[in-house]
Amino acid sequence: VRASGGLFMDMMIHDFDMARYVMDSEVIEVSAYGTTLIDPAIEEAGDIDTAIVSLKFANGALGVIDNSRQAVYGYDQRLEVFGEKGAAAADNCRPTTVEISTGESVVKEKPLYFFLERYTQAYIAEVTQFARAIMEKQSVICTGNDGLQAERIAKAAKESLLSGQPVKIEHKKYAVN
């Protein structure tokens, strides 16, 4: 945990990246709240294990990300988007889609346990697209700027957590080679 960069840089950075992609907009303000609820050793190492981050986007949209270093039931990563014309949701990946409903309960399998299980196909598609871009001299889908912006959001979240105040993110054009 000491060397990980903290919860925002170690874990939530991927959610910041996804939020920018889904909203098709830059984050302009971050408010972060966090604490240690699971493992006192994480607090002793100077980090948190549970956080909620609110995001304001340049296009006027709002976002909320909650994260924990522990989900005992599996790799829990869900997405919900609400808009003026409806809503969309992406649920956790599970070993099967079987759901058993009875008068006493509704039961389905736990989410996949680890991110490598959940994202195997995504990693294959990513490497395939990257190789195709090189061989066919095409642009890659994700740029260095995408990584930079996710890192800027993570740093702003840490600053907000420490200060107890929202943190604005200024956007300038960055040359990323």
Image (cartoon, rainbow, N blue to C red):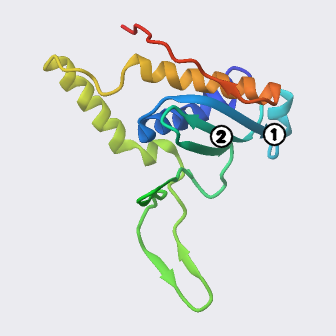
**Lower sequence index among marks 1 and 2:** 1
Tell whether 130 sits left or right of 22: left
For mark 1, what is the residue?
A: 35
Residue 135 on image: x %, y %: 15, 19
The answer to whether 52 appears left or right of 15 in the picture is right
Type of the residue with mark 2:
Ser
Q: Secondary structure at mark 2?
A: strand
Give the class, few, some or many, for how many residues have Cα within 10 Å of label 1's Cα (few <14, many ≥20). some
Label 1: state its secondary structure: strand
Q: Is residue 4 visible to the viewer in this orientation of the structure?
A: no
Q: Which residue is mark 2?
A: 54
Residue 100 place in picture, x, y as percent = 49, 81
Q: CA distance from mark 1 to mark 2?
A: 15 Å
Residue 25: assigned label = none
Q: Position of residue 162 (x, y in %)?
A: 80, 26
Residue at image position (65%, 31%) is 30
